[in-house]
Amino acid sequence: LIRLTVWTVPTLTQAPVPVIARNTGSATLSAAASGIPDPQFQWFKDGVQLTNIVGYVGAQSENLSTVGTAAEHVGSYFVRVFNSAGSVDSAPVTLSVLFPPTITTPQFSGGMFSFSVSESAGTLFSPGNVPPFQVQYSSNLPNWLALTNPLIFTNGQFRFQDTLPAQTGSRLYRIIEP
């Protein structure tokens, strides 16, 4: 009895997809492959082979996860799937990390409040790419209410208008991402 095993070069059955993560969590890139013998996995970031160092788990597995997310995780990733018959690389995908923006240059003019947002690595604002920020106000710090007027983004500035009732003293404002 002769047994013949035909080795096959791995084939990606699930390619990694781009991931956008908040800096308050973790992110996972996943891939799946088939081949004979069973394929092994090796992840790369910006062309450099990853190991299970601080900040990553699963560098030699189907799922690469970050331990937390930070600026150093932003980049281009691909996975190399290999066995004795050969190897195949996935197309590169990006991992973007969203960081809380810093509000700068607040101004009030003609009943319109405006402010700029300093962007962090991985966070890009444009008219079509603005997080669903919500403006809240408070006359007494424990209680916050949503402002019903929309937040407008034009020319790199966020703006909102608040019509204060005559009896209202001062108001505090905060911008949150629900």
Image (tube, rainbow, N blue to C red):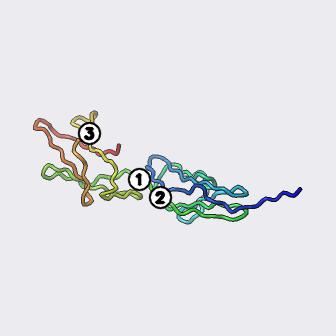
Residue 94 percent coordinates (x, y): 48, 59
Q: Nearer the viewer, residue 62 or 144?
A: 62
The secondary structure type at the circle numbered 1 is: strand
Is 122 situated left or right of 43 in this image?
Answer: left
Residue 34 percent coordinates (x, y): 66, 56
Look at 60% across and 64% down and name the residue there: 89
Residue 124 percent coordinates (x, y): 36, 58
Q: Quadrant of the C terminus?
A: top left
Is 25 situated left or right of 48 in this image?
Answer: left
Q: Amino acid at mark 1?
A: Leu
Mark 2 in CB contact with mark 3 (< 8 angstroms): no
Mark 1 or mark 2, earlier in chain:
2
Mark 2 or mark 3, earlier in chain:
2
Mark 2 crowdedness (10 Å alpha carbons): few <14, some 14-19, many ≥20:
many
Disc 2/disc 3 C-alpha distance (Å): 33 Å
The residue labelled by disc 1 is 98
Is 161 situated left or right of 84 in this image?
Answer: left
Mark 1 or mark 3, earlier in chain:
1
The residue labelled by disc 3 is 146
Labelled disc at residue 74: 2
Residue 141 percent coordinates (x, y): 26, 36
Q: Is 92 above or below relative to 133? A: below
